């Protein structure tokens, strides 16, 4: 099982490049970056209970762009997988994202993971003029269009949300297709992941925190969609994780765990990273 971190990188933390070097030097496999373009002050959408509820943490307001963070992290390292974890794709232009993601993947030597999600904050969607109710099928179509641009020398796509005539778009990724992680814990997201994602990427807390029931159910959904369950791994992004949790994820067949790396100061963040390194070594031996 691979173990990494996800970081709400902000202007008050260690910069993504130096932090990525520290993460890689401690033997972690990956570093993912969440996304929020902005947070409207009205706060008409409540912070979901599954993420903690109540007052929205300050770092949501201050995150760097995740693709730029990935580029700095990749440039500072040589083995670390970098990824959006997750990008709010429905709020972005698919053609621009295809080029940005392919550029990061190619310049990093194939170390980019393309995490996408449907989003929960209606306020952001309203600011972007995007219909919140169509976000599920929009993201699915955008991913299909992006994969077309990554694959074809002359790419063409005609859909409900993405439409472009035969076009050239380089660079192509170093990987044939950077893996698409679909973030989210609900049954609808699980269904979408089973049908078209490369990795299902739920975020606890959830009713089944160690996926003891959800994993077999997900694998059956993958099979029902006509895909090989062994070819669609499961990652997980817990906000908190102790040694017992990490061991349970390993025992239940989770392929990748990215643990939240959150602290009030850069020094506290480094101390937390050291704690995670000790825990990872105790559980998986490296």
Image (cartoon, rainbow, N blue to C red):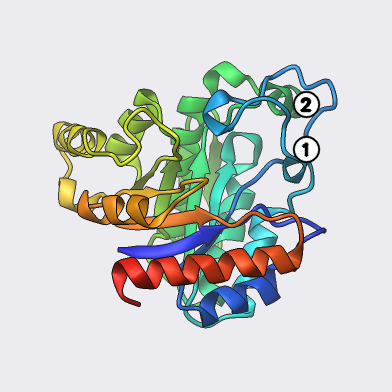
Closest to the camera, between mark 1 and mark 2, is 1
The reply to whether callout 1 and callout 2 are in contact (CB within 8 Å) is: yes
As displayed, is residue 137 above or below residue 193?
Answer: above
**Residue 19, image x and y in percent?**
66, 72
**Residue 182, image x and y in percent?**
42, 42
Q: Nearer the viewer, residue 89 or 160?
A: 89
Please state if 278 lies on the left or on the right of 73 as rendered.
Answer: left
Separation of marks 1 and 2 at Cα, in angstroms: 9 Å
As displayed, is residue 273 above or below residue 126?
Answer: below
As displayed, is residue 249 above or below residue 125?
Answer: below
Q: Which residue is mark 2?
A: 127
**Residue 262, image x and y in percent?**
64, 54
Secondary element type, mark 2: helix
Q: Is residue 111 visible?
A: no
- Give the crowd class for mark 2: few <14, some 14-19, many >=20 residues within 10 Å: few
Please state if 187 lies on the left or on the right of 9 as rendered.
Answer: left
Mark 1 or mark 2: name the one nearer the start of the chain: 1
Question: Which residue sits at x=19%, y=32%?
Answer: 217
Q: Which residue is mark 1?
A: 38
Question: Which residue sits at x=23%, y=35%?
Answer: 218
Image quarter (top left, top right, bottom left or bottom right) of the C terminus? bottom left
**Residue 17, image x and y in percent?**
68, 74
The part of the image, by quadrant, that contains residue 164 is top right
Q: Nearer the viewer, residue 259 or 34?
A: 259
């Amino acid at each position: 099982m691979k173990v990494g971190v996800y970081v709400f990188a902000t202007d008050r933390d260690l910069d993504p490049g130096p932090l990525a070097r520290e993460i890689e030097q401690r033997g972690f496999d990956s570093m993912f970056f969440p996304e929020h373009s902005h947070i409207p002050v009205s706060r008409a959408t409540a912070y979901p209970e599954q993420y903690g509820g109540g007052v929205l943490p300050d770092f949501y307001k201050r995150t760097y762009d995740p693709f730029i963070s990935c580029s700095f992290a990749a440039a500072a390292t040589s083995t670390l997988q970098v990824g959006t974890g997750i990008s709010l794709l429905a709020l972005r232009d698919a053609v621009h994202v295809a080029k940005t993601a392919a550029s990061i993947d190619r310049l990093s030597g194939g170390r980019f993971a393309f995490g996408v999600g449907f989003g929960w904050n209606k306020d952001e969607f309203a600011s972007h003029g995007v219909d919140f109710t169509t976000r599920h099928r929009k993201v699915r179509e955008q991913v299909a269009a992006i994969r077309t641009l990554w694959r074809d020398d002359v790419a063409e796509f005609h859909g409900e949300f993405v439409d472009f005539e035969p076009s050239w778009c380089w660079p192509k990724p170093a990987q044939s297709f950077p893996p698409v992680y679909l973030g989210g814990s609900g049954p609808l997201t699980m269904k979408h992941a089973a049908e078209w994602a490369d990795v299902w990427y739920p975020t606890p807390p959830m009713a089944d925190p160690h996926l003891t029931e959800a994993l077999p159910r997900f694998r059956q959904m993958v099979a029902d969609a006509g895909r090989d369950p062994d070819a669609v791994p499961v990652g997980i992004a817990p906000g908190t994780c102790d040694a017992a949790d990490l061991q349970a994820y390993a025992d239940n067949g989770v392929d990748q765990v990215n643990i939240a790396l959150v602290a009030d100061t850069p020094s506290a963040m480094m101390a937390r990273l050291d704690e995670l390194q000790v825990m990872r070594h105790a559980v998986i031996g490296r």
